[in-house]
Amino acid sequence: MGEKPIWKRPMIRPDDKFEMLTVKGRRDDGLWDCICDCGNPTYASTTQLKQKTKKSCGCLRRKSPANVIDITGNRYGILTVIARAGRTGQDNAVWLCRCDCGEEIPFRGTTLRRGEAVSCGCQKGEQVRKARDILQTDKSVNGVQIPLLTKGVRSDSKSGHKGVQKRVKKGREYYEAYITVKGKTKYASSKTLEGAIEKRKKLEEKYHQPYIDLFQVRQGKEE
């Protein structure tokens, strides 16, 4: 019986390309120095490159979806959003706001949209109370807050679509659409992203649209 062939790890050479990473050379610690397509230097292990678990320096993950909500210019209480100001450690969008008192301060987008920040702090107590009262009364239908139904996709969305996420179960990848109303979440799964997006739309039509329609009817009567 002949000897078993010795398995050798596939070679990686300088200038080899893996997704957005171009290999420049081997480091003393065994990792590979790489240059990302965005121009930033980074490093990766052989496994990360071969299995494509690292595709960029991190810029790919930081890119916002094309349909991410832009709240520049919006007013929240006495705050005016003036510019995007990066992300938190949890990858949530941060926005620079100018208070009517002249102070500039950053807030998370979700904090602003939920009415949890309506000033730099100079009028916090009174403004927060008024903002929450408006959200819970003028902008609610049967206890459902309409702005939470109509807001855009989160900036940290991995799928780029509201209420759609990629899941892995027992080694099987699939996409899951989900929607929440009155504290209860409904789910629908699909093998493809497109299928999950379509199922999310159907969930919106069934569970969100009736409340939005009632709100629009009420707004029309008030006008």
Image (cartoon, grey):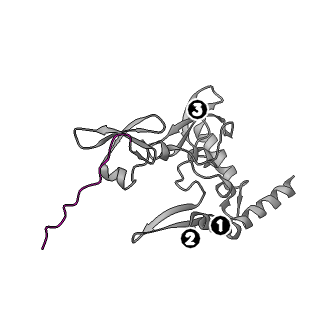
Q: Secondary structure at mark 2?
A: strand
Q: Which mark is residue 56?
A: none
The Cα–Cα distance between marks 1 and 3, rounded to whole angstroms, is 45 Å
Which of pointers 3 and 2 indicates the residue nearer the eye? 2
Front residue of this view, candidates 75 and 53 = 53
Mainly helix, strand or loop, the magenta region?
loop
| Magenta span contains residue 191 | no
| Magenta span contains residue 8 | yes
Front residue of this view, candidates 59 and 108 = 59
Query: What is the x, y in percent for residue 151?
Result: 65, 52
- Mark sitting earlier along the chain (1/3): 3
Q: Which amino acid is tagged 1?
A: Glu
Magenta-highlighted residues:
1-15
Query: In the image, is residue 23 above or below residue 167?
Result: above
Q: Contact (CB < 8 A) between labels 3 and 2?
A: no
Judge from the rendering whether residue 24 lies leftward or rightward of residue 93; answer left or right: left
Which residue is denoted by mark 2 in the rendering? 190
Quadrant, the N terminus = bottom left
**Image quarter for residue 6?**
bottom left
Query: What is the x, y in percent for residue 97?
Result: 60, 33
Which residue is denoted by mark 3 in the rendering? 122
Which residue is denoted by mark 1 in the rendering? 198
Q: Which amino acid is tagged 2?
A: Ser
The Cα–Cα distance between marks 2 and 1, rounded to whole angstroms, is 9 Å
Query: What is the x, y in percent for residue 95?
Result: 57, 37
Query: In the image, is residue 118 above or below residue 11?
Result: above
Q: Secondary structure at mark 3?
A: loop
The Cα–Cα distance between marks 3 and 2, rounded to whole angstroms, is 48 Å
Residue 183 visible in this rendered orientation of the protein: no
Q: Which amino acid is tagged 3?
A: Cys
Q: Could you tell me which residue is drawn at 63 percent across and 66 percent down?
A: 200
